[in-house]
Amino acid sequence: MTDSRATDPISRTLDEIAEEFALLGDWEERYGHVIDLGRAMPPLEAALKTEATRVRGCASQVWLVAEPEGDVIRFRGDSDAHIVRGLVALVLRLVSGRRAGDILAFDAQAAFRRLGLDTALSPQRSNGLASMVARIRAEAQRLATPAG
């Protein structure tokens, strides 16, 4: 089953997020918005919070699950830290429900620069965000490559 997210470019979702950020005054308000995104994200079931789903390279605990659904990949995730959970929600808003090729073609670092996350996050959080993106790209690559 394919939904409209699979055919909408990731750039459209990035535009929506950039507009939301632009409406917020400063980074304190933007951090609040990111935390709210995390609060709104459904929690990952405890049974899925395993070593196999844990993202390495994050200071906080982060878990990501990739679920192929037809020609798209749905991602679910969670974190034990409020701001990081919000960053997970933000990233998943961009990539979940997309085709593997679209995920692999997406320049996440450019998107984070556009949103100002490259300068607003601590180096530790930036490294964790990069680890999340690397894990998502690895899952997209794995699911895009036919088994054989």
Image: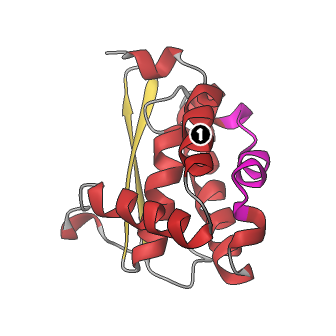
**Residue drawn at 56 percent across, 85 percent down:** 59
Q: What is the span of residues highlighted in magenta in the rendered image?
A: 104-117
Question: Which corner quadrant holds the C terminus?
Answer: top right
Kind of residue indicated by mark 1? Glu
Q: Residues within 10 Å of mark 1 (few under 14, many from 20)?
A: few
Where is residue 36 drawn, in percent x and y? 36, 62
User: SS class of the residue under badge 1?
Assistant: helix
Name the residue nearer the viewer: 96 or 139: 96
Name the residue nearer the viewer: 79 or 115: 115
14, above or below 137, in the image: above
Question: Which corner quadrant holds the N terminus?
Answer: top left
Where is residue 8 drawn, in percent x and y? 53, 18
136, above or below 81, in the image: above
Asked if residue 81 lies left or right of residue 116, the reply is: left
Where is residue 78 drawn, in percent x and y? 36, 65
Q: Quadrant of residue 79?
A: bottom left
Whether residue 52 is visible here, answered yes or no, is no
Whether residue 24 is visible here, answered yes or no, is yes
Name the residue nearer the viewer: 143 or 87: 87
Q: Name the residue under label 1.
A: 19
Q: Is residue 141 magenta?
A: no
Name the residue nearer the viewer: 78 or 101: 78
Asked if residue 80 lies left or right of residue 143, the reply is: left
**Residue drawn at 59 percent across, 60 percent down:** 25
**Residue drawn at 43 percent across, 55 percent down:** 89
**Residue drawn at 54 percent across, 25 percent down:** 99
Q: Does the magenta stretch include residue 116?
A: yes
